[in-house]
Image (cartoon, rainbow, N blue to C red):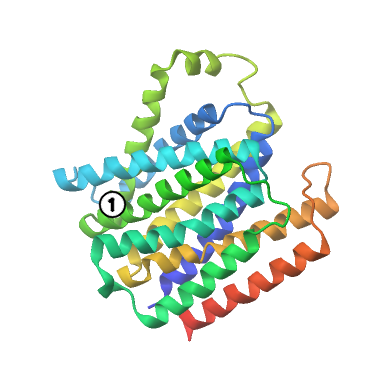
Amino acid sequence: MFSWLIIIILSYLFFSLASFGDKLVLRGVPNAKLYTFYVGMLNILIIFLIPFTKFGFPDPASLGWILLEATVYVLGLYAMFVALERFDVSRVMTTIGALQPILILMLTLAFWGSGVVSGMNLLAFVLLVSGSILISVEKKIKITFHYVFLISFSSLMFSLDYIFSKIVFLHQPFLQGLIWMRLACFVLVLLLLFSKKLRKQLFTKKANLDKKSGTIFVSAQFAGGIAGVLQSLAIALVPLSYLATINSLRGIQYVFLFIITLFFSLFLPKIFKEDISKKIIIQKMAAIFLIVAGLALLVF
């Protein structure tokens, strides 16, 4: 019954690795649009899954949802990368994740009505969201208009991505729906080539990744690709009543991300370092307790 739970936890593990890699590369890449283009281009690799399914052309209604999903995904991705350039990776990813489940719950109610959400699911949802918010709160956070706008916009786009993906999977076989959505994303980022400025950046030496950054980029996108497939599978498998809940489990991603950043900050500060005090560690541990409690309600 809860195979989707194991799948989504594994997905968030790989997302945390991808997020950390993105931050390492973005420290040396001054253009989020360029990075969005690179990430979007890698979606073409989805064609290697075609032999594993009975591939066919989607019906017109499904095609419309597929195009919408690709559009909101690319827009959310771009806004997230801009935010990652300007703010700490932990703060950006955790704040986006704290907003998403609330938005997804509202969108789920708007699309399918209140009958899809039960009391116990809602309690687990509240605990998981509370943990995600607590793990993302910072005492010395500097809230600016750009921060609020980028985070809010990215969260909304990614929330719509969840809803549109679920709609596609309700009408298309999993692999076929996934392949078409990723192909649509690939085609969409190709439209960025109409930008003369982007074309110029693509062919300048400064815009190209060096060997070290390129290795990190490929590794991060490989992890992100695995995470994306696992997340899509979880969205396809999960009942509508748990759709917002699986996103509220994103707090687990921030637990993984916190552990990774803590490890590097303590033992490999020359590679990556963020300010982590004892108070922050206590705060994160309290958040982890809430997340574990929410998980326990789901399982038991």
Residue in the picture at 64% in, 43% down: 21
Q: Is residue 200 visible?
A: yes
Total numbered circles: 1
For residue 174, side relative to residue 189 (left or right): left
| Residue 59, visible in the rendered structure | no
Q: Say which residue label 1 marks.
A: 53
Q: Position of residue 278 (x, y in %)?
A: 82, 64
Residue 25 image position (x, y, % from top left): 65, 35
Q: What residue sits 49% from the left and 73% below the top?
A: 126
Tag 1: Cα neighbours inside 10 Å, few (<14), some, or many (≥20)?
Answer: few
Give the secondary structure at mark 1: loop
Residue at the image position 62 percent from the left and 51 percent from the top:
17
Drawn side of residue 225 relative to residue 214, left or right: left
Looking at the rendered image, the quarter that the N terminus falls into is bottom left
Q: Nearer the viewer, residue 84 or 200?
A: 84
Residue 204, horizontal then vertical, whole percent: 59, 14
Q: Position of residue 261 (x, y in %)?
A: 73, 53
The quadrant where residue 258 appears: bottom right
